Structure formats: structure tokens, C-alpha cells
Image (cartoon, rainbow, N blue to C red):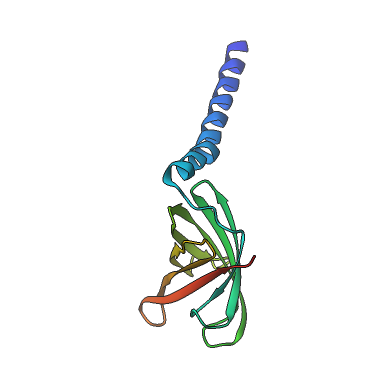
Amino acid sequence: MEEIIKMAVSALVGTLTVWIVTAFLLPKIAGILSGAAKLHSSWDYKDSETGNVVGTAKIHQFGNRVKVTATRKIDREGKNTNREFVYKGNIAGRSLVLPYEQKDAGGAVAGALVLRLDADLHMMKGSTSYFSDSAGKVITHPIFFYAAV
């Protein structure tokens, strides 16, 4: 019986060690080695460079891993809305690739966001793409993020 307990504890310690290394240590090292930029935590975003702010985003970064929670407050037709999206992906240098889905939509609203951070780290621009069931094709829109500092 004592041997079984020792094996169980060893397995638990081994599993915990692997989880810590893969979830925390490796992303941090990868972020350092890849030269990943350190992102601001709060951002506003627009549909055009000169347009009005249509939403806000909170960014959590750990090494090269990035999680973004964004709330869209104005839809593309200019009407008030409240849609929340969760993005999870990576940053390499100043490039971000973030697959996403709308929160509480069960995966029915999903796409990808590809952004490039500017040299002063205060603006990201790129595009968001998703499959539109109503249009029957992939739709791509420009998107612009501005650090809310």
C-alpha cells in the first residue's frame, strides 16, 4: 500500500511539474527569445484609422502568449451593441495572430485577428476575418487598436 501511495504522489508531482513548465516557464522563455514586444494592457479599437472608437480591449500577456478580451460597443452599421470576444494566440516580435470567438456564442461566431504593432508600441493595425453564414464567404475588415494610456 505504501508503494502505491509513493507512486501516486510521484505521478502527481511529475504532472504538476510538467504543467508548470509548459504553462508558465516555456512561454516566458519563448517570449524572451523571440523578442516579443511587451503590450499595454488597455486598448481602444476602431474600424478605420480616422474613425470613432467602437470598442475596448484588455490584453493579458505572458511571455509570447496573449489573451485578449474585447467588447464591441458600436456595430459596423453605427448602432449600439454589446458583443464580447475572446482572443487567444501568440506574439512574435511585433506580429500578433489571434484566433477568436464571440463569448457565449458556442463557437458559432469565430475568426482570426492578425495585427502588427507599430514601432512605438502604441498602435496595432491589421485585419479581422471570419466566415459569414449570411454572405456565404469569408469576410475581412481592417481594424486599428490604440493604447489607452
In the rendered picture of this protein, how many numbered marks are placed on residues? Answer: 0
The location of residue 58, given as percent across then percent down, is 61, 62
Closer-to-camera residue (124/12):
124
Residue sticking out furthest to the left: 137
**Residue at 61% over, 59% down:** 41
Q: Quadrant of the N terminus?
A: top right
Closer-to-camera residue (12/68):
68
Closer-to-camera residue (67/136):
67
Residue 72 location, quadrant? bottom right
**Residue at 43% over, 41% down:** 33
Where 142 falls versus 98 (above or below)? below
Residue sticking out furthest to the top: 2
Residue 132 location, quadrant? bottom left
Where 128 falls versus 77 (above or below)? above
The location of residue 61, given as percent across then percent down, is 56, 52
Where 26 falls versus 118 (above or below)? above
Q: On the picture, is 23 further left or further right than 81? A: left
Task: Say if residue 37 shows up in the picture.
Answer: yes
Q: On the picture, is 48 further left or further right than 78? A: left
**Residue at 56% over, 35% down:** 20
Q: Quadrant of the C terminus?
A: bottom right
The location of residue 39, given as percent across then percent down, is 55, 56
Task: Say if residue 72 shows up in the picture.
Answer: no
Closer-to-camera residue (1/14):
14
The location of residue 2, given as percent across then percent down, is 62, 11
